[in-house]
Amino acid sequence: MIVSSRRRRFLTGLALSCLSVFVWGCRPSSAPEGTLQLWTLQLAPKFNPYMADVLGSWDTLHPEAPVRWTDLPWGSVERKLLAAVFARTAPDVVNLNPPFAANLASKGGLTDLTPLLPPGAEQKYLPSVWEAARDPEAGQIAIPWYLTVRLSLVNGDLLRQAGLSRAPRRWDEVPAYARSIRERTGRYGLFVTVVPDDSAELLESLVQMGVSLLDARQRAAFNTPAGRKAFAFWTDLYREGLLPREVVSQGQRRAIELYQSGELALLASSAKSLRSIQTNAPGVAAVTSPQPPLTGSDGTANVALMTLAVPRQSQQAGDAVALALFLTNGTNQARFAREARVLPSSLEALAAVRAELEAEQPSDAAEAQIRDARLLSATTLNSARVLVPATPGVKRLQSIIYTQLQRAMLGQISSDQAVLEAEQQWNRYASARWP
């Protein structure tokens, strides 16, 4: 690849400025006129070579619009982006998850990409994730980038000790399964956190159980027979001692710790987690098999999505959209999916990744296990979608529901009262935000 002298000088400065990138991000002090500002989330330093190569290719094609890349830690992007918007220094392209994209769009902070996209652009992406990057009022607020799906990583030894032939596939199978594991092995069947600011898995499970979270006016829609049944499901599991006590006080990290110590029969996590389990707990990894994720009766799984959005302040929106489409095209997504062990949103890239996985001949059992998990993840995309709507304030909704569920689990209130309290709290918030 031929890299322009301007790009070479830029990348040299970038490398020097990235010595503390993990904490502070890449912040070159100056850039040529017409430079596009790109912010991503926690890709540096591992993916510095990939980004330098891809951006070098972009510069060859678009020398009039070079890119300054800034990488931010997960926990700082919302604060930094809101500060940049306030200071009118927002980037041209920013890597966001759907909830924060929706929140920013609701404040008028994101560009509707619809008039800027080339004809048929949406046909190049998985329909379910393209739709998840669209806001009913603000339009197409982002372009899908990379994905992950949750699998069930199952300890086969604990299943056999419990006399079970397979792990549960549907939520209604969980109580009997969890009871068998607990009674016959002394371990736990699963761990689903109710810590308000942690994993959304429990919130997603409500949707899979047939619960509508919000109505068209953004008011609570979960105080229904289905919603009360779902709240009782989790309350009863906990009160019966079929969930670890820590689900009310510790997050998903604790689930990984319990699984690696052999205290948990099923870990809901991505295929990527297998590598760390193989490293940290080889004995547990050796008896682990990746299996389809838990779903509701219709078999719909959840997909987690990362997107690229264009803030409204961008003075180069056309070039910014072109850059986002370039980063998410089939070739670049396929390569990133290989290197990051994630899934692409591009149909072309997904077909390439599946073909590669099917043709792969792993060198040992550990690599075969990871290949099988990644292939299962790719197959799971066929029946996956973003389950929790990217509504502004959705993290507040999760916090309210989880807090009331905690109270019910701990016996402070009934599960029906928890539903009512959650409904009232959310509606007070929603009435103020959406009169």
Image (cartoon, rainbow, N blue to C red):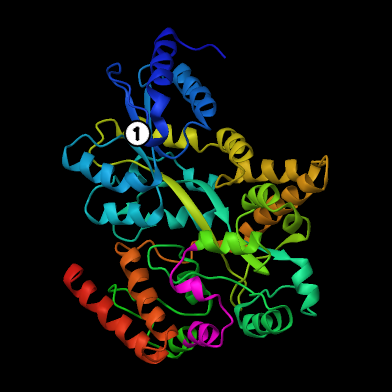
Callout 1 secondary element: helix
Q: Is residue 415 above or below residue 244?
A: below
At a point 27% along the width and 76% down the height, the residue shown is: 426
- Residue 165 visible in the current orientation: no
At a point 75% along the width and 60% down the height, the residue shown is: 289
- Of the residues shown, which amino acid type is indicated by label 1? Trp
Task: Give the x, y percent position of residue 43.
Answer: 47, 37
Q: Residues within 10 Å of mark 1 (few under 14, many from 20)?
A: some
The answer to whether 66 appears left or right of 430 in the picture is right
| Quadrant into which the N terminus falls | top right
Looking at the rendering, which quadrant does residue 149 occupy? Answer: bottom right
**How many labels, in total?**
1
The answer to whether 167 appears left or right of 296 in the picture is right
At a point 28% along the width and 20% down the height, the residue shown is: 29
At a point 78% along the width and 60% down the height, the residue shown is: 287
Q: Is residue 176 above or below residue 273?
A: below
Task: Give the x, y percent position of residue 321.
Answer: 38, 36
- Residue 293 visible in the current orientation: yes
Looking at the rendering, which quadrant does residue 315 occupy? Answer: top left
90 and 196: which is toward the camera:
196
Q: Is residue 434 above or below residue 56?
A: below
The answer to whether 349 appears left or right of 12 in the picture is right
Does the magenta portion include 233? yes
| Quadrant into which the C terminus falls | bottom left
Extreme-top residue of the structure: 5
Does the magenta portion include 82? no
Residue labelled with disc 1? 24
Q: Is residue 370 above or below residue 335?
A: below
Task: Give the x, y percent position of residue 80.
Answer: 27, 42
Q: Which residues are magenta?
A: 232-251
